[in-house]
Image (cartoon, rainbow, N blue to C red):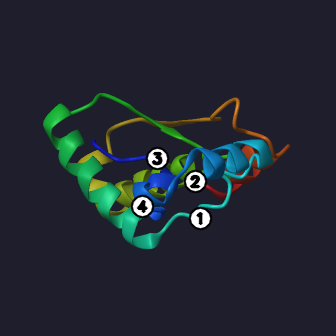
Amino acid sequence: MDWKEAPLRTWPAERWSPAIAEKYEREGYLFTVFIPDPKEVSLLAEQLARQLDALAPDELWIPMGTSNHGDHRTTRNACLLMLAEARRRFSGVPVSMYEDLPYAGIPGHAEQIRAAL
């Protein structure tokens, strides 16, 4: 759907350099500092709804967002928002969530999400 990785959406490409990229990779910080932006979540939810209208799926699989990977959490939030806003459209479509491995680094987080839902 033509979305860039979280770091590239929040920090323009011209500001990146090999030294900056190496620093973030070395510190394991690249994807973990990006909290889902409500505007991005809303925009992605709208795009997902349009795509799914065209596809008419029999089932949906969405990531649980069980880690600090910003793109996974944004996708999870957007999927849940889309489902909430289009309840009637998706009421007969089974929805499954998957634990997004290998990013699921917080023990028990999947169980917390299941319990909350």
Q: Earlier in the sequence, mark 2 or mark 4?
A: 4
Q: Nearer the viewer, residue 21 or 69?
A: 21
On the image, the x and y values in percent for residue 115 come to: 71, 53
Quote the CA–CA distance across marks 1 and 4: 17 Å
Q: Which residue is mark 1?
A: 35
Q: Is residue 18 left or right of residue 25?
A: left
- The disc placed on residue 12 is 4
- Discs 1, 2 touching: Cβ within 8 Å: yes
What residue is disc 2 on?
70
Q: Residue at x 30, y 62 (%)?
A: 43
Q: Earlier in the sequence, mark 2 or mark 3?
A: 3
Q: CA distance from mark 2 to mark 4?
A: 17 Å
Along the polypeptide, which appears first: circle 1 or circle 4? 4
Q: Position of residue 13 (x, y in %)?
A: 42, 54
**Disc 3 marks which residue?**
5
Instruction: Tell me the residue at 59%/64% (across/down).
Output: 35
Query: Which element type, helix, strand or loop, lies under badge 4?
Result: loop
Question: Dot 1, crowdedness within 10 Å: few (<14), some or many (≥20)?
Answer: some
Amino acid marked by disc 2: Gly
Q: CA distance from mark 1 to mark 2?
A: 6 Å
Residue toward you, 98 or 96: 98
Can I make out residue 32 in this image? yes
**For the residues marked 1 and 3, what is the alpha-carbon distance in whole angstroms?**
13 Å
Q: Nearer the viewer, mark 2 or mark 3?
A: 3
Mark 4 residue crowding within 10 angstroms, few (<14) / some (14–19) / many (20+)? few
